[in-house]
Amino acid sequence: MKIYKNRGKQIIYTRQFFFFTVCFALLFSAAGGRHVLAVNETDSLKSLLSEKTGRDKVDILVGLSRAKWNISMGKSLEYATMAYKLAEELDYPEGKADALNRMGNVHYLLRNYNNVIENYQLAFEIASSLQDHGRMGMYLNNLGLLFKELEQYDSSEVYLIKALRIKEQSENTELIASTLFNLGRFYREQQNYNLSLEYFVRQLDLLKETGNLRGLANSHNQTGEIFYQQERYNESIKHFLSSLSYAKEIPDSVIMARTNSFLARSYFAIDEPEKAMERIDQSMNLSKLTNSDNIIRNNYNILHFYHKKSGNYKTSLSYLKRYSNLKDSLQIRNSENRFIQLENIFETEKQYATIDLMQKEKRIQELQINRLDHIKYSLLLLLAMLGVFMFIIGYRFYQIQKTNKLIKHKILELEKTNEKLRQSSKALEQLNATKNRFFSIIAHDLKNPFNALLGFSEIMTTTFNELSEKEIRQYISILHQSSQNLYKLLENLLKWSAAQTGKMPYLPEKFDLVSLIHSEIHFIHISASKKNITISENLPDELIIVSDKVLLSSVIRNLISNAVKFTHFGGTIKLSARKYNQKVVVEVADSGIGIPNDMKDDLFRIESKICRKGTNNEDGGGLGLILCKELIEKTGGRIGVESEPGTGSRFWFMLPVKNGENSKNLHPQTESG
């Protein structure tokens, strides 16, 4: 919870000011004692809780929830729930929104992501009804970060941009700067460095106005890291030096240690080892003082690569061993921290289960008494039945021998029936996998393009007059790309559905395969030219075949589109067609990113979910190749792929021919071998 200031209304949340003065003073007064600080903070807030009433009490409960967060999630959730109920009784909407936000944060640690989304959205609706742009922006920002964690990047981008637009209306510089930072990191992780730099530059301008030294230090580090990734080392050094200057002014030893490590890496990159070693020494000294093992580990790794490049293999190996040992130690420590977190989760569940356990124990005692009586009467009945059974056994023994052969025959029949059932079960599992994959494509692959279409169209509708021409072009480009992806996915879905339901007949006709390939190359040419991809061909002047022209057109178009999607800018694609051993062979080869060996076997299987981003972040759900396999097998041919990661891929398909051309009476069948 924060103090929000609107220049138009000059509203100050006075009931929360005193509470947050205590809360933040306790939380950030010193480094290294988080648990002790949290205990002191909790005690201070508890003492205030007994003194306060009304809305002040709601704010204190929200503060207690924050203090217990990451220490006792059960207590944190309990305080947040109490705050929400009290705020509802008092008709205190701001308190309800803040309590919902705290509940969402607890569920985030518990990984109850559906509850997280529900709590953040409810909090946003309350803030929207109040026209509280500060809170609205904060909750949208949280949703954006959550979707990034869930790897739903289109939704994350939409929510973060919405958060920025709304925060700009609040005119709260600190809030705007935080979302600019998140957008900068988002685009940096997506390797969109130019757009990332724009947001970090905007954030730096705002932070200079407010004098936020820590924010300036962190933002300069992020900007320097982008320039380093772009191999613009001198510019990265300028930003790292600026970050170091701000960190010294704070002062913050951890930021200074990390920044010196970044500077050392950049100096090594421009071949200034003396300056680099000086920065490494400063970073190591500060890291040891602050117990920053992660930074020490990174320094070992930098020194390992530097000495390896310089030919000092013995020294390089020494630093590599230190790096590996410290990495293992950090992994063990992270495992211990995760164990503590799981223990907290267990304690939360344990509290809710205690009452139920006591009731169950009482019920068990009653059942044990009833069970003893039941056993006694059951034994008497069993003895009586045993006597009758022995008599019957003697009478039936000779009949068993007589019917033994019949039983063996029945057993054989049952085994055959069981085998048929196993085969049917396997077929049902495959059908179920096909159904699940189909619904997964509809739920996921259709949802993402619509998220982008709806999100960016809403932004353009509501803030069109505020957008620059560059932003408008950017959003229109994203909308166009999403529309193309959506159309292609729907086209493949409809064709695949028709093939599955038998509504796509095989209609052979005589045509020139070379002309068909030329027309498909022309269709894809615009997409290839955007990535400066060269499409070459090794085709005869004419290749007359008899097959289904519509089906082959769809196959060729999908294969060329895939090649364009996974080929780098400036790459090449080569198409060829020839006759070979009474077959027509068509190949589409590219110089793209290739396919891992463990993925190749699953490319043409509907039950396997393979979603890969193209070299320009193009979306894809893997349905195109599955459709290609269905259509090629319908023509009586087969399809395959040869690929190695990093060296490109070669997709091919074969069509059967007879006497130099396809037989019109050919019945489609899948070849083997």
Image (tube, helix red, strand yellow):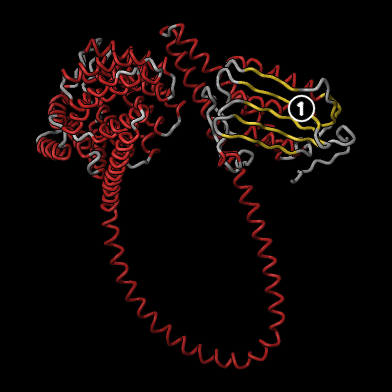
Tell me: 215 left or right of 581: left
Tell me the amino acid under the disc marked 1. Answer: Ala
x and y, in percent, of residue 35 in the image: 17, 40
Q: Is residue 525 visible?
A: yes
Query: Which residue position is annotated with label 1?
Result: 577
555 and 172: which is toward the camera:
555
**In this orientation, does residue 133 appear?**
no
**Which residue is pictured at 25% across the width and 38% down the height?**
80
Q: Please name whichever residue, 426 or 239, is drawn nearer the observer in this view of the structure.
A: 239
Tell me if 335 is positioned left or right of 282 in this view.
right
Is residue 362 placed above or below 470 in the rendered structure?
below
Residue 215 lies in quadrant: top left
Q: Could you say where residue 577 lies in the image, as x and y percent from the top left?
A: 76, 27
Quadrant of residue 519 in the image?
A: top right
Could you tell me residue 125's position as x and y percent? 36, 26
* Towards the viewer: 310 or 349: 310
458 or 333: which is nearer to us? 333
Residue at image position (73%, 26%) is: 576
Q: Is residue 350 left or right of residue 503?
A: left
Look at the image and tell me in which quarter the N terminus lies.
top left
Q: Position of residue 625 (x, y in %)?
A: 65, 34
Residue ID at (80%, 32%): 584
In the figure, residue 296 lies in which quadrant?
A: top left
Residue in view at x 26 percent, y 15 percent: 172
